[in-house]
Image (cartoon, rainbow, N blue to C red):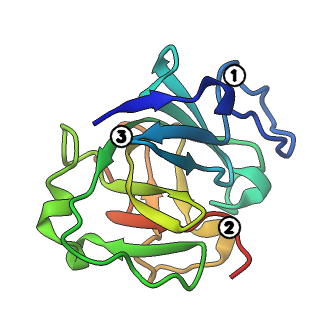
Amino acid sequence: MIFRALIVGLLLLPTVTLAAEMPRGYYAKLEISVDGQRLIFGPFVGYYFKPVHGNDLKKLTFRCYNERQFYTDQLPAGTLLFTGEAQFRSLPQVRDLPPRNARIEPVFFGNAPQQWLQTRPAPKNEFVHFHSTYNAAGPSYKGYWLRHQPATSFIYNMGGRIDQDSPLYHQAEPGAGQRFPHIIEFDAGPGPY
């Protein structure tokens, strides 16, 4: 597999002002070339990514901020919620991609093919969130497994939009075991839908 970063394609997009100054070298959106395909990763509310080594986009570090209190209504806007790492993987095409009804179509681990789950990097119990790349045709089987490490304590309630019955709702605690939802998200890119 050929995996090349499009250095020109690393874009720093305008975002809302954060409570803390954005660290240098982080990007809201990445454009990559894999096997001759141009793929896009991001932007997502509050998430910023940085290659671990130069312009090699196989491994990233990331920061997630509570922009506009999007992830929790317990903390102020701009609070750093998660740090973490992301590793690029391709999911086997053993099942069709979900129908495209919205920007992001989730598949929880209980409904995911085992072949997809086997692509998680080690430690597998900590890489529990996959987010796909996309192009003009929609989501792809290629994307990143993310490992979230809470930077502070809070209830992940999507800014008060979900309650305890949602599989996304959880208590985040620094140093605690991985509680982030076990989810694979197929991203069709910015709408309209």
Residue under the image location 70 percent in, 42 percent down: 79
Determine the residue located farthest toward the front in the rendered image: 36
Left or right: 55 in relation to 76: left
Q: Quadrant of residue 81?
A: top right
Asked if residue 126 is positioned above or below residue 171 in the image, the reply reads above
Q: Residue at x 74, y 58 (%)?
A: 69
Secondary element under disc 3, as helix, strand or loop, is strand
For image coordinates 76% across by 43% down, the residue present is: 78
Residue underneath mark 2: 159
Number of marks in picture: 3
Q: Which mark is residue 23?
A: 1
Q: Residues within 10 Å of mark 2 (few under 14, many from 20)?
A: some
Q: Position of residue 171 (x, y in %)?
A: 45, 59
Judged from the image, the secondary structure of the residue bearing numbered disc 2 is helix
For the residue carrying disc 1, how many other residues have a C-alpha within 10 Å: few (<14), some (14-19), or many (20+)?
A: few
**Percent x, y for residue 14?**
84, 41
Left or right? Give the position of 108 relative to 18: left
- Name the image quarter holding residue 104: bottom right
Which residue type does callout 1 highlight? Pro
Closer to us: mark 3 or mark 1?
3
Could you tell me how far apart the alpha carbons at marks 3 and 2 are, in whole angstroms? 29 Å
Q: Disc 2 or disc 1, which is closer to the eye? A: 1
The amino acid type found where label 3 is placed reads Phe
| Residue 150 shows up from this direction | no
- Residue that badge 3 annotates: 88
Q: Between residues 118 and 193, which one lies in front from this camera angle?
A: 193
